[in-house]
Image (spheres, helix red, strand yellow):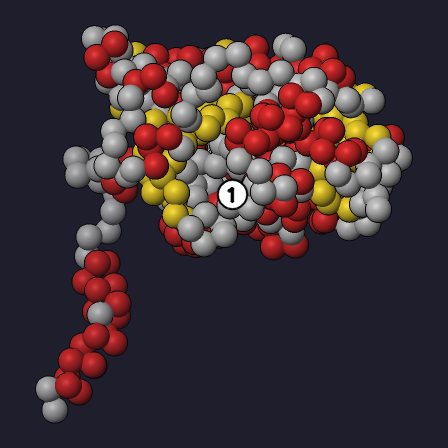
Amino acid sequence: MSRANKVVLAYSGGVDTSVCIPYLMQEWGVKEVITLAADLGQGDELGPIKQKALDSGASISLVEDGRDAFVTEYAFPAIKANALYENRYPLSTALARPLIAKMLVEAAEKYGADAVAHGCTGKGNDQVRFDVGIAALNPDLKILAPAREWGMSREETIAYGEKFGIPSPVKKSSPYSIDKNLLGRSIEAGPLEDPMNEPLEEVFAMTKAIAETPDEPEYVEIGFEKGIPVSINGENLAPVELISQLNDLTGKHGYGRLDMIENRVVGIKSREIYEAPALLVLIHAHRDLESLTLTADVTQYKRGLEDTYGHLIYRGLWYSPLKEALDAFIDKTQEQVTGTVRVKLFKGNATIVGRKSDNSIYAPDLATYGADDKFDHKAAEGFIYIWGLPTRVWSQKMRG
């Protein structure tokens, strides 16, 4: 009995999503499969995808450019929120999932499909992000996840595909599982599953090894308008171009690598290697500019919400009421976050060495210890007495 008549399948061109096409039709009785590959900056990987999907049995093969939306509607809000999962991971892969979910739903509605599908397994985070995101955007659509149910090993999956004309990988596949987009790369599995194994240089593509980086530092000035990065070294750039240039600039100096043990949504730990040079330096610079333009109480209160924001993205809750409410708060805080941050790139480091803003609330005549000091030092004594009064009363009580 058919689980659906017409399905839009999130398609990457790999073995699993290719096998999903005949599997959905042969095993689950789906009459028509439409594939959708989202171009989020994978580069050459998208070249042969369109034809491969058709050869695997898809009736329509869509390849849609989502790069601009990816940066402006997903990356930029995360930068304004300084979103880091577990205070480290800048969510470069996680941010792509709500956009792909949106593209799947839009395609399903356009082509009259009654279901969407993906190739996620039952252990990963992406199944959560896709399922929850799709349900939030269109709860009437069925969600099919064949790879979560078919129980085939990789060898069995390849053999199943060969029966329907899907070629097996020509060469021995890499032991690593890699996901790539404009914001970064994630690398896992293979030797990396042992947390004590140092990642080999072969796993990295966006960042140079320290030994291969320039022997002289390079300075880059990043301009922000209301929390959004808009320029590099004084030149205004389109969003995708800005991210691309920063990836090249920072990656050349070996900055942007992460090696971490991560707590997945499903309750297990995984060892993850990330490269996200542009995204990491932008969050680093943006947070610094906030320190110049926001009051202490706003900055400090926002830090707790940033942690919540990162968890929402990681756990697939981009389209949630709490996320929407946090966006309203964050957008309000960004009204004054306009200025320039100067970053020194050298040997794997991105060090902030300067910042300026017309909205700066740093007052030199109050901060200086020189002759221009206008701070009322006499006022400090009374302030300290009032400030410390609760502690003094408590201490007297404890001493009897």
Screen quadrant of the C terminus: bottom left
Q: Give percent across and percent down for residue 92.
A: 49, 32
What amino acid is at disc 1? Answer: Gly
- The residue shown at (10%, 86%) is 399
Q: Quadrant of residue 26?
A: top right
Q: Is residue 296 at least partly visible in the picture?
A: yes
Report the side of 393 relative to 31 (left or right).
left
Q: Give percent across and percent down for residue 291.
A: 37, 40
Furthest-bottom residue in view? 400
Label 1 crowd bin: few (<14), some (14–19), many (20+), radius 10 Å: some
Q: Quadrant of residue 294?
A: top left
Find disc 1 in the rendering and name its residue: 124
Furthest-right residue in view? 112
Query: In the image shown, does 368 or 190 lie closer to the viewer?
Result: 190
In the rendered image, the vertical position of residue 187 relative to residue 303, given as above or below: above
- The residue shown at (71%, 49%) is 136
Q: Give percent across and percent down for residue 77.
A: 56, 37
- The residue shown at (20%, 81%) is 394
Q: Is residue 82 at least partly visible in the picture?
A: no
In the rendered image, the vertical position of residue 53 relative to residue 112, given as above or below: above
Query: In the image shown, does 299 or 320 lie closer to the viewer?
Result: 320
